[in-house]
Amino acid sequence: MNPADIEKNKVMGGLAYFLFFLPLIACPESKYARFHANQGLLYLFVCFACMLVMAILTALLWRISWLLAFFNLVVWLAVFALGIIGMINGFTGKAKELPFIGQFRIIS
């Protein structure tokens, strides 16, 4: 990626983890911003998948709520850590993929 492109679009790279489409609107020609928009979209999918799984588990396993609450905490801390890693990479000018999910491409 072009260092000038990275320097110009660092803020958009970091904001992509809040609103993945923002870099696509603000700077659609930037490869750096598109990379982080893709990572942000993957992060959004992981958040929705975790919400769905936790809702199903809560409905099925409500009798062992103490164990489920602990599992829920661990899952959401991991998801939160992914978001923080992505934002740090975006704001500091690094084009590193998110752990476990970053290798997938939705936005090219």
Image (cartoon, grey):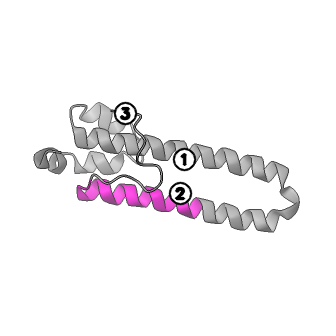
Residue shown at the point (24%, 43%) measured from the top left: 32
Spatial CA span between label 2 and label 1: 8 Å
Spatial CA span between label 1 and label 3: 16 Å
Residue shown at the point (82%, 49%) measured from the top left: 59
| Residue type of the residue flagged with mark 3 | Ile
- The answer to whether mark 2 and mark 1 are in CB contact below 8 A is yes
Q: Which mark is residue 46?
A: 1
| Nearest to N terminus: mark 1 or mark 3 | 1
81 left or right, relative to 8: right
| Residue type of the residue flagged with mark 1 | Val
State the image coordinates of residue 55 (x, y, percent, origin top left): 73, 48
On the image, numbered disc 2 is attached to which residue? 79
Identify the element where label 2 is drawn. Answer: helix
Q: Nearer the viewer, residue 25 or 59?
A: 59
Residue shown at the point (46%, 43%) measured from the top left: 42
- The answer to whether mark 1 and mark 3 are in CB contact below 8 A is no
Residue shown at the point (85%, 63%) measured from the top left: 64
Is 80 contained in the magenta span? Answer: yes
Locate residue 106: give its quadrant. top left
3 left or right, relative to 66: left
- Magenta: main secondary structure equals helix
Q: Which mark is residue 107?
A: 3
Q: Where's the N terminus, which quadrant?
A: top left
In this rendering, the answer to whether 30 lies above or below 13 is above
Spatial CA span between label 3 and label 2: 21 Å
35 left or right, relative to 48: left
